[in-house]
Image (cartoon, rainbow, N blue to C red):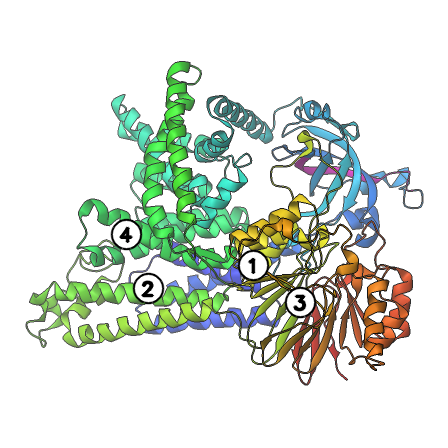
Amino acid sequence: MKERPLLGFTVCWVAGSAAACLCTGSGLLLSWVGLIFLLVSLMMWETMSWKYIAVLCFSISLGAGYWEWNEARNISGIPELLDRSTAELSGSPVEARGTIVSVVERDGDRVDFTMKLSHMDLLAEDEEKASDPADEQEKRVQGELIAVQIKLLTEQEITVAAEWRRGDEVLLNGVLEEPAEARNFGAFDYRAYLHTKKIHWLLKGQGVENVRANVPDSWSPLTIFRLNDSARTVLGAELDQLFGQRHSGYMKGLIIGMQDDLDPDTFKQFSQLGLTHILAISGMHVAVYVGVLLFLFRRLRLTKETALTLTFILVPVYVLLSGAGPSIVRAGLMSMIALLAARVGMLKDGLNILAASALVMLIWNPYMLLSVSFQLSFLVTLGLMVYVPLMNPLLSALPRWLKGAVSVTLVAQLVSFPLTIYYFNQFSLLSFAANLVFVPFITFVVLPLGTLALLLGRLWEDAAGMLAHITELFNNATFYAVEWINGFAGGVLIWGTPSLLWVGVYYVLLYCLLYVAKLRKEARAAPQYMEDETRPLAEVGLNSPGRSGYGGRSGHGGMGNWQYLNIATPLLVHWSGVIVLVSVLGLGILLYKGYQSESQAGKGTISYLDIGQGDSILITTPSGAHILVDGGGTLNFGQKEEWRVRRSPFEVGAKVLVPLLKKRGIHRLDAIILTHGDQDHTGGLQAVVEDIPVSALLFNGTITDRESYMELMRTAMERKVQLYAVHQGMTLSPDDATELSFLWPEGRSGEVSGTPPLNEVPLLEEQNHDSVAFRLEMNGRNFLFTGDMDLEAEEEIVGLARQKGISTGPVIDVLKVAHHGSKTSTGEAWLEFWNPEAAVISAGVNNLYGHPKAEVLERLEDHHAAIFRTDQQGEIQMRVRAEGIAVRYKLGEEGVGIDK
């Protein structure tokens, strides 16, 4: 195998960095030893020199060391400088001075930017913590980055905020806060994300009067970015003039990489089909840009060297104008390296150019390794280089004009598939066809038309308007087609997050399959090599110059000698069929196992999700049935003014609940139990019903006259979800080990299913009293779910039981405390009747209602119930076996057990 020092060095650098990222202490040492052992084993298998192996081992060590060195430096110096602990600083008012180093973005009534600090001090109004003037020197912060969020108080402040630019020197007052951490298992961790940006604090301010910005009076490197931001703003405004609202946001993403104004519904539709990469500037854009420049310079009769040099200089301009995202930076670097290589006549290997680009980016910022766009960009590009030559012979039956497009699209889909399901937990079965059709159409028709309209906007308005109109017609056709394709039921598959081992095995099996299949096909097409099994190796060209290494006649990327050996030996050709079969079976088993939800192995799981001030509980039975109790909801206090509305406002269902369900591999919910109609229990279910198949929805038999609730019910009926009104005395048995016994409400029965109008269902505005309450028995353990039921409902349930001669109910292992710990629930009689071993309270951190109330906590403690709280511990997860209940929670110390 041909040695490629640069490629090997970069791969080992990435491996060392990844090991340092994933492991610490002894784990990192074991990973390092394992990687070194793998390299030594490779040397014994392949013909590689000791010097080459030593360089690769050094690269692994250097990559790991460089990551650890950056991690050791990536800490906040603010607590030490202000002589306060992190806990003391969080929530403290401060004055900060520094320089804006990012684009200033406004979304509704909030302005965001990143500031590089030069000074910070506690405000004097915090008298006990105020700094002494003598300590002024200690308060100078050496370049730490901080994320700033300014909430605008009036519409007139928009004009003031619009003047802020990258490079401005700012002095502002605000409150210092730690970024939020993930509060559910597997959820997005904002704090960890900002850590990769070397940001450790948020500074939140109110109103523009707390911000003083001054334009810099001298040139700095930020001036270039400042001018670039202004140019992008002008281009964006021009696109706004040319195109309608939905189209302008779409064209901004295509032409200049601005996705802020992209319609959320459009993005969702494209995402579902795996087409979001079209909306990001990528290598295709750079290739077209470089090709156009070289063509123009050739027409101007410039020398080859001059044309290459000018193009090399102009590529960074396009990268900056396109937003300088990881994919465009990768493509720009590769183009610049290729142009430089062509200029000086060296480094012509595409894999080495890709490796050089990755190495430069990782040295500049090692945290790029954790960027999804970086991973997808480099992995897909690498996959195209490695797998397309293997795929092309297998598609020889296709016409030449179609073979290239099918090969590239298919390889891109196969290579990106593991990362797509790892990060986004869904994959469309129609993605290949959609990419095959839409990518060339948008790249070679829509993008050029839109770009030409933009270029003509100031020169020939009529022509620009006509081109923009034609482009909008094509866009409308695209939007309609994408929406129509997404309408096919079952087109999108939900995948749980696979392990890194699963991802690695997938790529190995895929390579084996394509490589051996290619050899097998070439062997059948070359019978002349099989005439004599005993011919000397020299006669079949094993040692012939030009037939080995990358770029030789073998044409499959560096495995030339082995290819000819395999073709020459009928025995190996025979075994290649077995290898293909094993690879196909292996991939099939791998995909099947990856798609299946996690095996319960006889245990049940109850997850009390942390969705803020609200309830949402996921029940998974021992047989794997999934039941969701409530869906939380974002509380809105009154109608916002139009200028305050954000492009994609936070909604707990879409932002928290649906991603969690998908990440856990839940393909279908067997039932949703809607305890009652309050917004903090129903709001998040709209996104759930829209994005995840649901078999049945159980509710209390009433509706509330609130538009969001009515929309949820209409959506459920449109999607053929069976609606059932539950009442006292009903039971539900998902499997032999699980039974739900409904305790409340009383007096309503019947089924609402199919198409009966909702106006036939009783209307009830005050829903708490009629909350659905039920007892869950699973593996011999008892759980009580209560919604927001009040004291009166509790007393009626207890009274009815005692009328039947039941003085106490079965001992409850875990009680879900009603109404988030409000004093209107969880009375003394209720606790005496059930005698719970433990209690879970679902409440938001620092909620406005003061939940849970002190008297409720006291009553629970008096009954010796262990108390778990989502506001303090995040998600609380209980794994239920007959032997006991194992509890773990996201925040705080390790979990405990509940045993009788």
Instruction: Find the distance from the CA under tag 4 to the CA under tag 1.
Output: 48 Å
Q: Mark 3 or mark 4, which is nearer the start of the sequence?
A: 4
Q: How far apart are marks 4 and 3 (CA)?
A: 44 Å
Q: Which of marks 4 and 2 is nearer the N terminus?
A: 4
Our reading of the magenta stretch's main secondary structure is strand
Q: Quadrant of the N terminus?
A: bottom left
Q: Nearer the viewer, residue 452 or 11?
A: 452
Eye-nearest disc, 4 or 1: 1
Residue 183 in the image, given as x and y percentages of width and height: 69, 59
Separation of residues labelled 2 and 3 (CA atoms): 39 Å
**Is there CB contact under 8 Å for labels 4 and 1?**
no
Residue behind mark 4: 407
| Residue designated by label 2 | 511
Residue drawn at (55%, 34%) of the image: 261
Q: Give the range drawn in magenta.
A: 111-126
> Which residue is tagged 3?
607
- Could you say which is closer to the camera, residue 242 or residue 206? 242
Which numbered mark, 2 or 1, is in the foreground of this view? 1
Q: Residue 180 placed where, x, y %?
A: 70, 52
